[in-house]
Amino acid sequence: MFGSDVTATDDESRQEPELAVLRKGFALVLTAEEITDRLSERTNGETIDIRSL
């Protein structure tokens, strides 16, 4: 899982191509909101230690 809108780059024109490489290779690229929603669904809204995921 990789956050598409929570990362930084020194060359904005390379952000989307890099996300495409991650998608193609191994990553599930999601927005921060999508990540939060999925984690909330998995934990039924309970607070969890992220290291346990």
Image (tube, helix red, strand yellow):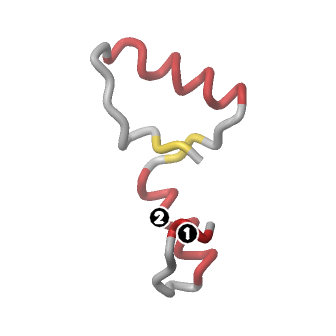
Is residue 38 placed above or below 24 in the rendered structure? below
Corner quadrant of residue 10: top left
**Residue 50, horizontal then vertical, whole percent:** 51, 68
> Which residue in the rendered view is the most extreme toward the right?
25
**Residue 16, horizontal then vertical, whole percent:** 47, 22
Q: CA gap, disc 2 to disc 1? A: 5 Å
The residue singled out by tag 1 in the image is: 39
Q: Residue at x 63, y 75 (%)?
A: 42
Q: Residue at x 64, y 43 (%)?
A: 28
Residue toward you, 51 or 33? 51
Is residue 19 placed above or below 13 in the rendered structure? below
Image label count: 2
- The 10 Å Cα crowd at callout 1, few under 14, some 14 to 19, many 20 or more, is some
Corner quadrant of residue 53: bottom right
Is residue 25 placed above or below 36 in the rendered structure? above
Q: Residue at x 58, y 65 (%)?
A: 38
Q: Residue at x 31, y 13 (%)?
A: 11
Q: Which mark is residue 47?
A: none
Contact? badges 2 and 1 (CB < 8 Å): yes
Taking the image as shown, residue 14 lies to the left or right of residue 1, namely left
Q: Secondary structure at mark 2?
A: helix
The residue singled out by tag 2 in the image is: 36
What's under tag 2, amino acid-wise? Thr
**Residue 47, horizontal then vertical, whole percent:** 46, 83
> Which residue in the rendered view is the most extreme toward the left?
10
Q: Secondary structure at mark 1?
A: helix
What's under tag 1, amino acid-wise? Leu
Taking the image as shown, residue 47 lies to the left or right of residue 25, namely left
